[in-house]
Structures are given as structure tokens and as C-alpha cells.
Image (spheres, rainbow, N blue to C red):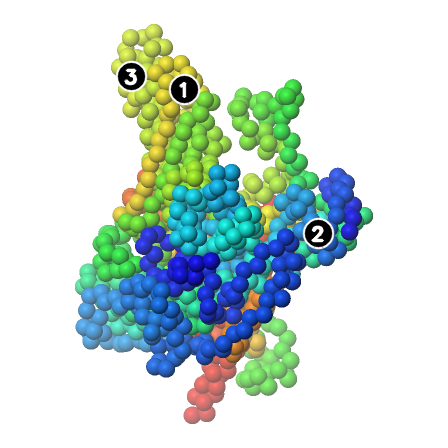
């Protein structure tokens, strides 16, 4: 079937079998930040935002996402290499970090991504895009969540061995 | 397909310390989930449909599901294939994949000299690694007709070496690449599915992707060895241990991957912690016997902790019972008998995974300090043995109906919930001595940055970061000036892979050595540049050794400096051109154990048997901590995983050997929001066998949580649960027998 999807604000025209999951098509279109964790959405690694709400991409069909705003982790810090003539970003201009590409790129990260880095909320990183999107959905709705609300937001989505709840507090 | 190639899926160094008993495809399937055929298709849907069209005629053979039946005469024999290759004492005619008999000292004499002998049987279940990224591999022929295997593995170099004969290709025609991967926990120390994709690429000439579903992770992957562990311990009345014995029946499932080494490690680590005291300390009496048997179950394998969590469940539950029976303080009793610095690792004189043993001295033991700081953090002194604290939980309303039906013993004046506190001391190892090797190379670039190439395999632990930090420290540059590329058999030096808690220690030492070679050469060139540049004649005496590297500069004692970028341009372009580069490898003559004191605080519901773990404190001596953020991430993640082992994770099979748990709905692993308070304390020692003084972090958090929780439950309600996980049902049954006993006593 023919399909038009709006992913991170960009329209995509594609064809797919009616049975294809949104997860499968997102990865096919190059949005590799969304991951397969299990076929029941219980790991939450397949979390994306659909009209601002976290959903499991492996549990909905690609066709169901038509007409909805799909947001993946790639939307938060779009890859933007320095173009000729553009000049370095602010971080690169400071003498202390001269020559450091890493710092230049890092300055473009979303504040939630920055917070995850600073608090060490990453082990393997496999479920990190999902966690960050879940955090974004929560914070967009409620900029000052209580600990209970944070725990609730994690619990709906994520199994994760490597990290504890503390980074969310940051 | 070449059925005749028998191999082991265990990703280990050559020669594989276990039997070769596996084929890519065999004419016999040995467990529900074993392979019957391969299908490749353009889409997963077509492949699924093709699978449904395959009609397999099975000749049903008798099955063996109970490990206690495996060695009995007349038991079904799983491995009767003529190609079977033995290792050590494997005996497939008796379903024995491996057998271990270790006697240290004179155990019988030790028992004869004991005032009391304590015996107990402990059981641990089969559990799943449950890495969030399933096994996944892609294979393709590259433009030079070499087979590329891009795979989620902990052991890229072992994959290449071990699969070469299976695929009928020479090692040099295979390239294995490990990209960023999503966890492994030992499940990927296994050459599990790469052969499937590779066979199909060889057959079709086309790229092949194979990815496990979560269900396949449960039914067709690997798991932790379930064990039945018999403890026998001789003790003097003052608490001196005179002899300690562990006998294990371990279930390797259908194949013997990691059979010998996992169960060997169970004894080698958990039975090494307590050596006895006084004259017994000088010559410990320790016996460790194990039979590792085949059954028609999903194969066991490597899982973070590698046999040691099983051992410490038995040892630490047993030690707690002994301390209480003798009226001794459980921590003083443990420390009295625990190993101390300067003593031999007792097993190092007797056993080395089927290889020649080398005696090893243990240099650093931070146990006493771990106990001191851990006790303070959890408030041990105010809680242990304090009945007021135990009943300090807010009272919940109790329905009279429940009370009379369940126990008849409660009235509403008795709190339904009781608190308890428990502890376990544990040790692990750091790499396999005289065997595990890691290589590293470092190359200087035009701008004074460096390429660091390591075979070391970051499976999501952050080892790439930690190794870059170590190189950066030696070279005097920020970490971002170190460009890490790892785990590619074509480009990086060899590394045995990510297992046995070894990367920071082994691969890290290789990185430090390579960085030192590079630093030395940079200093030689810097001395030359500074001497020529200086107008002061005396600078001609500037020795390279006097120069230090810091802030991207080489700095002379008088403060003059030259930047690494200038040195790089000079050496690559201007004069006496050379590539500054270093390569080094490291093998350790010892496996210095990290130690830890694991504390747990629980609340037990005396009506339902439900256990809520309120707090876990782990004080750990892992030597010097290179990166506190990633190290505490490892400890907290490990405690999370270990808590599942303590209270809820278990793989159960029906009478036909079919798995009950097939997804994260039926098999519950702890979510971040369900975790109790976690506290990690690093008690840093300096391990002299390593240039930066480090010991392992990765596996030790798996060891102590379950026994600490078990001991805390004993403290709370007087119930001994000898089988983990301690589910509400087991605790509830235990509570009933405690009440019944109390009932009988009161009747007398």
C-alpha cells in the first residue's frame, strides 16, 4: 500500500505491506534511533512520540501513523555538520576547546540529552532514545513533574537493566 | 552444509576448555527451541510462511529433563554422535559434560577437628540474561570476496577463529566487526547465530540478516546454569572454620558450552573467600566437587558472574546459618575466616580451568573497610538484632478472615509486616591469569590527536570511554583527543573479548603500555625541539625523561613547552620524519579479586509472604576507580539484575520441556521505577599488579544481593529459604512452618 508519513516534520512517501509495523518502516527509512527490544512492546526500546505521546512503534502498524506527527530521537539533535563558510559554533570559538569537534557537536544536543550525559544515565545506550523521548513527552506536558510522575512515566515504557531511576531526577 | 564440523558455541580462547558437541544443523534436536532448518527470504513474513510449509517428521526419543536423573543407569543419552570431542573428564555416555574434583589441604582431617559440622542443600534456578538488544548479525561478501560478519557479540576474535572451520573458510577470509551493541551480560560470549547467516550468505551470495525475537531469546539462547549445591562446613566453637566442602550438580542443558568453566568458577571464587583462621588459614581445607550434566533443556552458558552468584547463594546463606547457630556476630564470624592480603588464592594452587595452575598471591583485600563503611551506610548497628526496629513498620489493617484461615496465629495487635536486615560478603576475579590477552595500538595524528585501536569489546559498559581516558591520562590530552576504534578483526589488535570482568584491567593495561611507548617517543622529539629552540645553552642537557605531558603540551622542567600539534607536524612533515606509534599487549600473571560487602534491608508481609526490598548498599573494593560514573552504573545495573535473581526471575518448563516464560510479561525483570534505594560505596585499594591499580567492577554486583536478601528475610521472620528466587509462596510456606513449630512448642 502507499503511505505518507510525517517523521520529524519531514514528509515521506513510501509503500509497504499492510502488515508492516511502524518500527519496521522507521528503521527502513533510516531512523535507526528506534530499537527493537521485544515483540510485545514491554521493553519500551521501540518508543517514539505520536502527536507528542509516547507509543510503542512495534505495536502499531505503519498505516495507523498516517496523518499523525511522528517524532523520533533524531528530531532532538539533528545531525548538522559545519558547512563551508558557516564557521564554528560558539563552543568551538572559545580558546579552551579549540579544535574540538566533539564539543562543537555536543553544544547542539537537546537539554535532556545533555542531562543524560552529565548524570551518566547511559550504559549501552540501546534504550536511551526511548528514555529521552519518554522524558520529553513528560516534560513537554509538565515542566515540573514530581518524583511519582517521573516514576510513572518510566514505568509505562521501560525495562532496563543497566540504569537506575536517579538520572531522571536530574 | 557440513554436518561433520563439530564445534562449541562458547566464545573462549584456544583450545576451548569444554567438549565439542554442537553442529550448525544436526539430525537430532535436543531441546524445544533447537534448530531444525534454516530459511532465508526477502522479508520476515515470507520466511515465516516458508517455515510453516516445512514438514518435519520427528522420531520421538526419550527425554531427560531432571538433572538428578542424568547420571543414573538407563537415562537417555543426549550425545551419542561419533564426532563428539572430549575435554578433560567429559563422559557423554553418562551425560557428563564436565566433572571437577578439587581437594585443597586435608578436608577429612579438618572435619575431624571440627566441634560442629553444618550441612545444607541450596538450589538456584535457570535465569535469562535479558539484554534489551536481542542477538543480531549481518553477513555479506565484501568486494574482495571475504566474508564480513557484523554481529552483536562480546567476542569478535573468537567468532572469527571458531567459525572458520564451521564455515569451511580460512580465518583470513573472514572479517568480524562488532558495532555499538545493546548489552550482552554473557549471552553474547556465545557464537550463537552468526553461523546461520554466514551459511546462508555462502549459499546464496547475498547479504543475510538474522535477528532473534524476544521469544527466541528465552527458548533458543543461553541462560544461567541452574544448580543444586550441597554445603558441608566444619567449625570450632569459637567460629574458626576447619574445613569447607561444596558439591554441585550443575545442569548445562543440551550442550556443554561453558559447562566446565562456569561451574569451576562457582567453586573457585565462592569457596576461596573463607579459608579459616589460625593454623587453618595457613593451610586451608577446601573441597570442591562438581558434576555438570546434559539435560534436554535450553543450554546454559555464560551470564554475568559466570557461576559465582550461584556459589555465593549457597555459601552466604550457609555462613549466616552457622553464625546464628553458634551465637556469633555474622560479620565478625565471616571476617575471622575471610582471606587476607598476602595469602595465596587457595584455588590458584590447585585449579585453572583445566589448565596448569599457577599460585597467585592476593595483594589487596578491602573487605574490612567495605564492612565498616557499608554498616554505617545502612545503619546496621541500630537495626541488626533490634526487635523494635523489626516491628517499626506502620501497621496495616488485617482482615480477620485472612488471619484465621492462613495461620490462625495473628491477631490485629501483631504487625503484619516485619523488617529485616542481611549481609553477604563476596569476591570475584579479574580476568583469567596467564591466558586473557588484550592488545592496543596508538598512532599520533597531524594535530596531536591520537587513534586508539583496541580489540577490546565495548558491549555497552563504556569501556571505549574508559580506555580512552587511560590513554589520555598518559598522553596529557583531553579524552576527546583520543579517537577510539574497537573490535574489528581486520583493523584492531587482538583482544580475547569482553568477559571475566577484564577489560579495564587487561585491555586497560595494554592501552597504558602502548600510550607509554608513544609518550616516550613524543618526549624524545620534544626534548630535541626544545633544545634547539632554547637560546640558553644549558637546555642542551634537557633529558626526555624530565619532560612531562599535560594540557596537549610537552613541558620542560623550566616551564618551556611545545604543543603536541607542533611535535606531530615536525615528526610527520618537517624533520627526521617518522610515525609516532605504539603497540602493546597485556596478559596478567594474576586475577586479583575485587571484594564487596552487600547489605539488604527488607520488609516481609507475614500474611502473604511478599518481600519488599527497601534498600541495597554495596561497599566494593574494585581497586582504583577510573570512571566513577560508569563504574557506579555498572554496580547499580548489576544490583538491579541481581535483585531479579533474588526475588522473581526463574525459567520454568513443562513436562514436555517447553518454556513457560517467553516474554517480558511472564518473565519479569526489574524496571527502573521498581528499584529500591541503591547505594554504592567504592573502597579504593591500589592493586599493585596493574599500572593504574585497578581491579574488576563488572560482575561482582551480581553475587551478593540474593543471599543478603535471603539473610534479611531470615532476620525479619525467621524463615530460611534455601532456594532462590524467594517468591512470596516460598516465604509464606516457610512462615507457616515457623508458626506451626511455635504452635507445637506452645502446646508442649
Find residue B553 and report its horizontal and vertical position in percent: 41, 22
Disc 2 to disc 1: CB gap under 8 Å: no
Query: What residue is drawn where x is 35% and y is 34%?
Result: B583
Find residue A168 and report its horizontal and vertical position in percent: 61, 48
Provide the residue designation for mark 2.
A22
Number of the label disc, if any, that sits on residue B586: none
Give the position of the C terminus of chain A as an image quadrant: top right
How much space separates mark 2 and mark 1, taking CA atoms?
A: 51 Å
Provide the residue designation for mark 1.
B572
How much space separates mark 3 and mark 2, taking CA atoms?
A: 66 Å
Label 3 element class: loop
Establish whether labels 3 and 2 are both on one chain: no
Nearest to the eye among marks 3 and 2: give it. Answer: 2
Establish whether labels 2 and 1 are both on one chain: no
How much space separates mark 1 and mark 3, taking CA atoms?
A: 22 Å
Query: What residue is drawn where x is 58% and y is 63%?
Result: B215
In this rendering, is residue A57 above or below B565? below
In the picture, measured across the screen, residue B243 lies left or right of residue B618, that is left
Label 1 element class: helix
Q: In this orientation, does residue B189 appear?
A: no
Subunit of label 2:
A
Provide the residue designation for mark 3.
B542
In the picture, measured across the screen, residue B623 lies left or right of residue A111, that is left
Nearest to the eye among marks 1 and 3: give it. Answer: 1
Query: What residue is drawn where x is 26% and y is 60%?
Result: B351
Query: What residue is drawn where x is 62% and y is 50%?
Result: A35
Q: Tell me the crowding category of disc 3: few under 14, some 14 to 19, or many 20 or more residues within 10 angstroms, Cα based.
A: some
Q: Nearer the viewer, residue B308 or A83?
A: A83
Amino acid at each position: 500500500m502507499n503511505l505518507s508519513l510525517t517523521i520529524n516534520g519531514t514528509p515521506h512517501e513510501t509503500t509497504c505491506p499492510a502488515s508492516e509495523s511502524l518500527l519496521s518502516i522507521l528503521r527502513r527509512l533510516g531512523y535507526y534511533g528506534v530499537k527493537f527490544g521485544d515483540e510485545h512492546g514491554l521493553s519500551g526500546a521501540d518508543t517514539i512520540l505520536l502527536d507528542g505521546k509516547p507509543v510503542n512503534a512495534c505495536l502499531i502498524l505503519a498505516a495507523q501513523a498516517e496523518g499523525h506527527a511522528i517524532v523520533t530521537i533524531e528530531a532532538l539533535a539533528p545531525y548538522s555538520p559545519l558547512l563551508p563558510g558557516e564557521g564554528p559554533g560558539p563552543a568551538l570559538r572559545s580558546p579552551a576547546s579549540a579544535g574540538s569537534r566533539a564539543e562543537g557537536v555536543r553544544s547542539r544536543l537537546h537539554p535532556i540529552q545533555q542531562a543524560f550525559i552529565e548524570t551518566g544515565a547511559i550504559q549501552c545506550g540501546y534504550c536511551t532514545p526511548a528514555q529521552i523521548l519518554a522524558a520529553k513527552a513528560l516534560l513537554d506536558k509538565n515542566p515540573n513533574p514530581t518524583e511519582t510522575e517521573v516514576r510513572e512515566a518510566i514505568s509505562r515504557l521501560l525495562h532496563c537493566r543497566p540504569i537506575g531511576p536517579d538520572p531522571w531526577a536530574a | 552444509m557440513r554436518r561433520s564440523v563439530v564445534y562449541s558455541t562458547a566464545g573462549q580462547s584456544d583450545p576451548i576448555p569444554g567438549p565439542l558437541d554442537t553442529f550448525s544443523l544436526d539430525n537430532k534436536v535436543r531441546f524445544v527451541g533447537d534448530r531444525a532448518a534454516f530459511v532465508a527470504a526477502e522479508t520476515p513474513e515470507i520466511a515465516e510462511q516458508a517455515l510453516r510449509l516445512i514438514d518435519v517428521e520427528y522420531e520421538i526419543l526419550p527425554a531427560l529433563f531432571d538433572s538428578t536423573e542424568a547420571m543414573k543407569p538407563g537415562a537417555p543419552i543426549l550425545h551419542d554422535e561419533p564426532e563428539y570431542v572430549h575435554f578433560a573428564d567429559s563422559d557423554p555416555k553418562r551425560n557428563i559434560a564436565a566433572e571437577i574434583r578439587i581437594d585443597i589441604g586435608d578436608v577429612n582431617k579438618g572435619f575431624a577437628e571440627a566441634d560442629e559440622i553444618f550441612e545444607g542443600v541450596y538450589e538456584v534456578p535457570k535465569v535469562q540474561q535479558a539484554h534489551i538488544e536481542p542477538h543480531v548479525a549481518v553477513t555479506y561478501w565484501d568486494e574482495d570476496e571475504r566474508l564480513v560478519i557484523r554481529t552483536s557479540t562480546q567476542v569478535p576474535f573468537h567468532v572469527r577463529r571458531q567459525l572458520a572451520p564451521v564455515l569451511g573458510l580460512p580465518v583470513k577470509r573472514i572479517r568480524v566487526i562488532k558495532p555499538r551493541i545493546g548489552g550482552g551480560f554473557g549471552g553474547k560470549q556465545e557464537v550463537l547465530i552468526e553461523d546461520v547467516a554466514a551459511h546462508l550468505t555462502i549459499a546464496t551470495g547475498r547479504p543475510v540478516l538474522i535477528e532473534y525475537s524476544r521469544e527466541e531469546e528465552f527458548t533458543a539462547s543461553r541462560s544461567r546454569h541452574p544448580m543444586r549445591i550441597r554445603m558441608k562446613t566444619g567449625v570450632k566453637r569459637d567460629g574458626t572454620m576447619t574445613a569447607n566442602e561444596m558439591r554441585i550438580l550443575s545442569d548445562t542443558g543440551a550442550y556443554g558450552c561453558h559447562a566446565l568453566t562456569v561451574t569451576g568458577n562457582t567453586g573457585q571464587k565462592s569457596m576461596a573467600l573463607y579459608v579459616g583462621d589460625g593454623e587453618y588459614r595457613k593451610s586451608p581445607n577446601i573441597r570442591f566437587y562438581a558434576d555438570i550434566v546434559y539435560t534436554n533443556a535450553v543450554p546454559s552458558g555464560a551470564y554475568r558472574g559466570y557461576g559465582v552468584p550461584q556459589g555465593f547463594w549457597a555459601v552466604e546463606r550457609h555462613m549466616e546459618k552457622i553464625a546464628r547457630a553458634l551465637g556469633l556476630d555474622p560479620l565478625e564470624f565471616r571476617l575471622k575466616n575471610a582471606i587476607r592480603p598476602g595469602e595465596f588464592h587457595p584455588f590458584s594452587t590447585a585449579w585453572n580451568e583445566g589448565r596448569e595452575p599457577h599460585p597467585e598471591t592476593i595483594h589487596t583485600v578491602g573487605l574490612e573497610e567495605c564492612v565498616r563503611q557499608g554498616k554505617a551506610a545502612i545503619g546496621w548497628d541500630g537495626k541488626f538484632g533490634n526487635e523494635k526496629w523489626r516491628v517499626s513498620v506502620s501497621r496495616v489493617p488485617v482482615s480477620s478472615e485472612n488471619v484465621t484461615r492462613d495461620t490462625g496465629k495473628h491477631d490485629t495487635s501483631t504487625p503484619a509486616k516485619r523488617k529485616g536486615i542481611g549481609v553477604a560478603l563476596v569476591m570475584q576475579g579479574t580476568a583469567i591469569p596467564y591466558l586473557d590477552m588484550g592488545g592496543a595500538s596508538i598512532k599520533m595524528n597531524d594535530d596531536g590527536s591520537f587513534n586508539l585501536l583496541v580489540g577490546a569489546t565495548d558491549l555497552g559498559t563504556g569501556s571505549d570511554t574508559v580506555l580512552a581516558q587511560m590513554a589520555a591520562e598518559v598522553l596529557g590530552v583531553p579524552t576527546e583527543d583520543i579517537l577510539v576504534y574497537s573490535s574489528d578483526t581486520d583493523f584492531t589488535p587482538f583482544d580475547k573479548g569482553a568477559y571475566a570482568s577484564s577489560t579495564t584491567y587487561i585491555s586497560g593495561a595494554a592501552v597504558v603500555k602502548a600510550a607509554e611507548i608513544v609518550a616516550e617517543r613524543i618526549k624524545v622529539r620534544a626534548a630535541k625541539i626544545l633544545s634547539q629552540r632554547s637560546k640558553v645553552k644549558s637546555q642542551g642537557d634537557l633529558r626526555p625523561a624530565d619532560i612531562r605531558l599535560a594540557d596537549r603540551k610537552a613541558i620542560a622542567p623550566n616551564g618551556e613547552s611545545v604543543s603536541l600539534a607542533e611535535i606531530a607536524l615536525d615528526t610527520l612533515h618537517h624533520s627526521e620524519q617518522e610515525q609516532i606509534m605504539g603497540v602493546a599487549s597485556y596478559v596478567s600473571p594474576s586475577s586479583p579479586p575485587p571484594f564487596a560487602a552487600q547489605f539488604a534491608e527488607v520488609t516481609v508481609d507475614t500474611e502473604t509472604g511478599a518481600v519488599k526490598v527497601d534498600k541495597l548498599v554495596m561497599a566494593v573494593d574494585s581497586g582504583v576507580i577510573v570512571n566513577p560514573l560508569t563504574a557506579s552504573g555498572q554496580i547499580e545495573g548489576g544490583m538491579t539484575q541481581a535483585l531479579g535473581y533474588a526475588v522473581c526471575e526463574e525459567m520454568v518448563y513443562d513436562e514436555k520441556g517447553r518454556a513457560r516464560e517467553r516474554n517480558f510479561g511472564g518473565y519479569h525483570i526489574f524496571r527502573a521505577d521498581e528499584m529500591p534505594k541503591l547505594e554504592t560505596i567504592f573502597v579504593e585499594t591500589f592493586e599493585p599488579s596493574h599500572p593504574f591499580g585497578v581491579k574488576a567492577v563488572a560482575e561482582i554486583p551480581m553475587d551478593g544481593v540474593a543471599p543478603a536478601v535471603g539473610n534479611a528475610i531470615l532476620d525479619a521472620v525467621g524463615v530460611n529459604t534455601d532456594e532462590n528466587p524467594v517468591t512470596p509462596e516460598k516465604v509464606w510456606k516457610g512462615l507457616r512452618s515457623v508458626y506451626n513449630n511455635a504452635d507445637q512448642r506452645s502446646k508442649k
